[in-house]
Amino acid sequence: MVPNTAQMFREGKAELLKLYGNRYLVYDNRGILLPQSFDALITIRNYKDFQRRLLRTMDDVSYIREGFFVAHNLEPSNKMKVWGLENHYVQNQLVDTIIYLTNDFDPVHMMAMSL
């Protein structure tokens, strides 16, 4: 019998979200608050000269587009711009979505803005 790795991944991620997840508000590209919100875990990757922030969620965030903003529900004035989304699959099953957030000092973001 083959173990259902995707199901095990989702169960583990759901437990982490329950313990450490936060609620995030969504704003469109004009800064208008949308009625949708989602739970996610934030990951901050430290590089030499900058930090990259990622949100990992199991909620349906297909409505979020590049250029939208997200903010922690307790800090709605601290909006972070969405740079992109990536679906994460295990055994051909969607298990979570990664939301990439921009940073003013992120070299990839700076290169894209200079074009």
Image: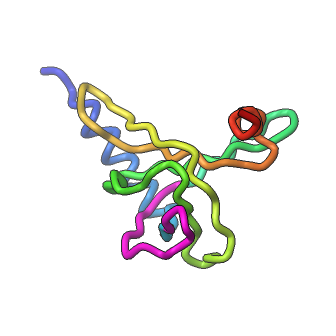
Q: Is 35 part of what is drawn in magenta? A: yes
User: Residue at position x 46%, y 42% from top?
Assistant: 85
Rendering quarter of residue 77: bottom right
Q: Quadrant of the C terminus?
A: top right
x and y, in percent, of residue 13 in the image = 40, 48
* Left or right: residue 39 compared with residue 101: left
Given the current orientation, which residue lies at the most extreme front position?
115
Looking at this view, name the residue that lies furthest to the right: 49
- The stretch in magenta equals 27-41
Q: Across the whole image, how many numbered discs are drawn on residues? A: 0
Task: Give coordinates of residue 28: x percent, y percent.
Answer: 49, 65
Of residues 112 and 7, which is closer to you in this image?
A: 112
Position of residue 66 measured from the top left corner of the image (x, y, whole percent)? 51, 48
Q: Is 5 placed above or below 81 here?
A: above
Identify the coloring. Answer: rainbow
Which residue is more in the foreground, 69 or 88? 69
Residue 34 position by quadrant: bottom left
Please name the residue shown 81% across and 44% down the image: 105
